[in-house]
């Protein structure tokens, strides 16, 4: 169904693997993943796919503990050769800061 | 032809103003320098000496990053730094003069010197901006990232 939608609209297909966490409870990885899916779903130019084989790009999210907070990492790679297209890193001091970060990245970068 | 020249002169004047203008960008962390990005493009290596050329559009999204991590950002808009309205007078037609100064005067003035007013408004970005990069004050209690999410 998703594949058909992507073929019809001609938009890019993005696969999002589980969020990698370092020194952060996995609950926050899940919170970041759900939020990113919600924001990306708003964008007509991007379709999220559940199978890595179907995507032409892979969006890897990471949460890495830092001295003052957590670094939220977004890395977009080409599916065929895993080469890096872009990366964006932003500090968050509490989980409520995920919203403006994800909103900005999904609007300006992911499409 | 005259109108075309006038419009061109005004456009060139505005372009010169925008072209020369810069925004002085600083961060609220005096200890270290941060790289500054304007609308996603790196414009300064060190925030301790950073004057960013104003963007052509109406919005500038300024970010401060250290070791590739963004620690703070600010969005500024054209008009945040004030505006200036300029009215220019030049020779026009009797009809224009009547419109500008009223019918009786306009007809009288228009007979001798037809007039036309052109008003332009130029909006400016602020000349100085501070990007907040410091962590919030939390009395030494950082968010417990290693514990389960209480909102779940």
Image (cartoon, grey):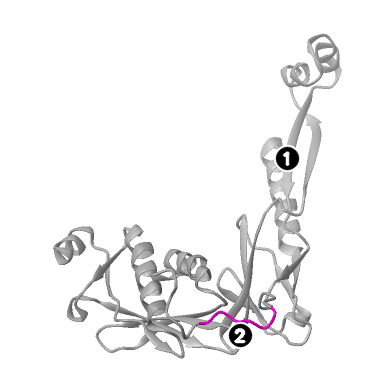
- The residue lying at 76 percent from left, 57 percent from top is B17
Chain letter behind tag 2: A
Mark 2 neighbour density, 10 Å: few (under 14) some (14–19) many (20 or more)? some
Membership of B142 in magenta stretch: yes
Label 1–label 2 contact, CB within 8 A: no
- x and y, in percent, of residue A68 in the image: 61, 85
Question: According to the image, label 2 marks what residue?
Answer: A68
Question: In which image quadrant can residue B111 be found?
Answer: top right
Main secondary-structure element of the magenta-colored stretch:
loop
Q: Is residue A61 above or below residue B73?
A: below
Q: Is residue B32 left or right of residue A68?
A: right
* Marks 1 and 2 on same chain: no
Q: Is residue A110 left or right of residue A52?
A: right
Question: According to the image, label 1 marks what residue?
Answer: B120
Chain letter behind tag 1: B
Q: Is residue A111 visible?
A: no
- x and y, in percent, of residue A42 in the image: 35, 58
Membership of B76 in magenta stretch: no
- x and y, in percent, of residue B98 in the image: 77, 16
Circle 1: element type: strand
Extent of the magenta region: B139-144
Q: Quadrant of the C terminus of chain B?
A: bottom left
Circle 2: element type: loop
Mark 1 neighbour density, 10 Å: few (under 14) some (14–19) many (20 or more)? few
- The nearer-to-camera label among 1 and 2 is 2
Question: In which image quadrant can residue B35 be found?
Answer: bottom right
Of B125 and A26, which appears nearest the observer?
Answer: A26
Of A53 and B97, which appears nearest the observer?
Answer: A53
């Amino acid at each position: 169904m998703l594949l058909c939608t992507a073929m019809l609209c001609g938009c890019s297909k993005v696969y999002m693997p589980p969020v990698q966490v370092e020194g952060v409870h996995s609950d926050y990885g899940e919170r970041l993943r759900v939020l990113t899916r919600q924001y990306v779903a708003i964008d007509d130019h991007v379709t999220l796919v559940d199978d890595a084989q179907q995507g032409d790009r892979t969006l890897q999210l990471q949460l890495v503990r830092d001295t003052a907070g957590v670094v939220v990492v977004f890395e977009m790679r080409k599916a065929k050769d895993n080469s890096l297209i872009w990366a964006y890193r932003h500090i968050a001091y509490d989980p409520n800061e995920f919203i403006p970060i994800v909103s900005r990245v999904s609007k300006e970068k992911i499409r | 032809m005259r109108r075309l020249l006038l419009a061109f002169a005004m456009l060139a004047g505005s372009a010169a103003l925008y072209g020369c203008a810069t925004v002085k960008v600083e961060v609220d962390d005096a200890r270290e320098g941060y790289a500054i990005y304007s609308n996603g493009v790196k414009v300064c290596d060190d925030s301790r000496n950073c004057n960013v050329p104003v963007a052509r559009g109406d919005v500038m999204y300024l970010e401060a990053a250290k070791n590739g991590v963004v620690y703070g950002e600010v969005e500024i808009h054209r008009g945040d730094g004030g505006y200036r309205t300029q009215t220019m007078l030049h020779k026009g037609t009797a009809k224009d003069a009547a419109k500008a100064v009223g019918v009786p005067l306009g007809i009288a003035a228009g007979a001798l010197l037809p007039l036309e007013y052109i008003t332009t408004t130029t909006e400016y970005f602020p000349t100085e901006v501070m990007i907040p990069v410091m962590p919030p004050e939390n009395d030494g209690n950082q968010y417990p990232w290693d514990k389960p999410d209480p909102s779940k």
